[in-house]
Amino acid sequence: MFFAQGVACAQERLWQMEFQRRVGSGRLSDAVGNVDAAIRIDELMRVVNFYGAAQAALTNLDASTLLAVQAYCDGVNAYLQSDPPIPLEFDVLGLSRHPDPWLPADLLVWTKLMSWQLSGNMNKELWRWDLLTKLNVTTQRIAQLNPPFDDARFPIVLDPIAELHLQEQEATRQATPSAAEKQEEPILAWLENWRKERAESIAAQQAKMKSKHTDSAAATASQSAAAYVRESIIAYQRIFGDSRASNNWVVHGNRTTTGKPFLCNDPHLGLTAPSVWILFHLECTGCDDPTRKYNAIGSSFVGAPGVVLGHSSRIAWGVTNTGADVQDLYAMHEPADGPKHPVTGRGMQYWFNGELRNYTIRNEVINIKKHDPLVLIVRESVYGPIITDIQRDKDDPDLSVPPLALRWTSLDPVDHTLGSFLRIPYAQNYSEWRHTFGPYVAPSQNFIYVCCNCRVVSCHAVSCHDVLTWSWCCMVAG
C-alpha cells in the first residue's frame, strides 16, 4: 500500500518532492545558484542539521514504521526507474533528468521541516533577545509588547463562579502589581556578569577587526547574530509560508439531523502552489485481523506515507497547531581566555555544570551552482547547535552577546511522530487512538476525535524538554 502511495506521489509531485529534500538537506543553492535567499536557507538547514537529525531518527524507528518508510521510498524509486516524464523545472535549472534514488532520510527530513514550520517560538525568543540586548528595552516593556499566555487569568474552560472569581483577581492585580511582575529577569544579571568578564577580550578583538577596515563605521555596524538567524528563518517562510493559526471543531450527533457527529478541520498551513497537501484513499484489506486492516481517506503530506488528517471506517480525526514551547535557546558561557578556532576566532569551549566542555565541530560545505562553495564551521553543545554560527560576516562578528544554542525536541535522536500518524487509522476506538500518541514528539498539536458511536474528544500531543532555570523573556543561561 505505501509502495503504491510512493509511486502515485512521485507521479504527481516529483519536482515538489525533489525541491523539499534539497531544502531539508541544505542543497538548494546547488540547484539555483548564487541566490541570497537560497544560501540563507541552506545555511539555516546545515547549522540546525535537519538532515543529520533525520538520519539519527531513522536508526531509532520501530520496525513497522521503518517498513512503511522503506516501502514508500521503494515506490518512488520504482517510478524513477520507469523512465518517466521529468518535470519542466529540472530542465529549466539544468538538473539531471535522472534524480538520485530516494532514501528514507529524504522522507524523514520533510517531517522535520514541517515540525520546524509549526514550532515557531524560537523566533520570538530571538526577537525578545535583540530588544533586551541591542535596544535595552526593559523586560516589563517586552512583556507588554509580546506578553506570554497567562493560563491563570485566561483558563481554557470556565464556569460562572470561577469566572466571577477571576474578574475579582484581575481587578486586584491591576491595582497592585505582583512581585513576579516587579522582579528582574535572572538572565539580565547573568548577561551583565558575562559582559564584564568578556569586556577586555571583546575590546581587543574589536580593535583588531577595526584595523582591517578603512571605514571604522563599517567595522562597528555589525548585524546582530540573532537578527541574521531571524532573516534566514524569514527566507524559509517566504517559500513555505508562515502558519499563523488553525482551527477545528466537532458537533456531537445529538445536535445534527443525521444523528452522526460532524468533524471539521482547517489546519491553516501556508498557501503554496502546489499545496503541501495531497489527497489519498489508502486501503489494505488483505488481512483477516481487523486491527491490521488499513482504510483511511484524507490529506497526506507530499513526500510522506499515510494519512495525516482524515477518517477511517470507524473514526475521524483532525489537528490544529498549539504553539507549545518546544524550542529553547541557551546563552552559552565561554571562558574569556579559552582557546579559539583558528579560522573563525570563535570560542572552542563553554561552561556546563561547573566544568569546561569542548564544542563538537562540524564543517558544512554548501555547494553553490557555478560558484565557489561556502564553508560553514558549526559548533555543537550539549544542548544543540550554536545557531548564531550562521552569521556570515566572519570579519565582524557580533561580540556583544554570547553564542546561542538551540535545544529543540525534533533534534532528539528518538522521534516516533511519523509512526504515531501511521498507526491512527488502525485504531478501532478512543483507547486505541489515544495510545498511538504515546511516543509522539513534535510539532505540538491539538487533536480532535470522533467515532461512529458519537464519542467526542480533544487532546494535546507534544513532547517538551525540562528547563530548570526558566526565563519567559528570551532564553536561559547555559
Image (spheres, helix red, strand yellow):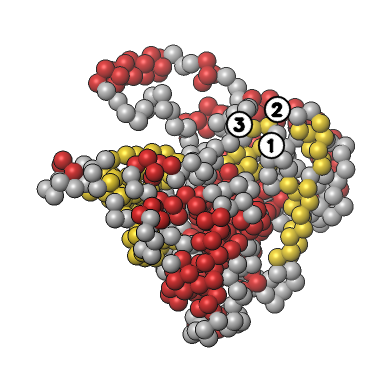
Q: Quadrant of residue 195?
A: top right
Q: In the rendered image, is residue 233 in sight? A: no
Query: Cα distance, mark 1 to mark 2?
Result: 9 Å
Q: Are marks 1 and 2 in contact (CB under 8 Å)?
A: yes
Task: Point out residue 137 in the picture as x, y percentages from the top left corner.
Answer: 58, 33
Q: Is residue 184 left or right of residue 310?
A: right
Q: Secondary structure at mark 3?
A: loop
> Which of the marked residues, 3 or 2, is nearer the chain's N terminus?
2
Q: Is residue 70 left or right of residue 248?
A: right
Work out whether 115 lies above or below 178: below
Residue indicated by mark 3: 467
Residue indicated by mark 2: 190
Work out whether 232 lies above or below 224: below
Q: Secondary structure at mark 1?
A: strand
Q: Residue 331, labelled with which disc?
A: 1
Q: Residue 174, labelled with which disc?
A: none
Question: Which amino acid does the dot numbered 1 rest on?
Answer: Ala
Question: Which amino acid does the dot numbered 2 rest on?
Answer: Trp
Q: Residue at x 88, y 43 (%)?
A: 339
Q: Quadrant of residue 34?
A: bottom right
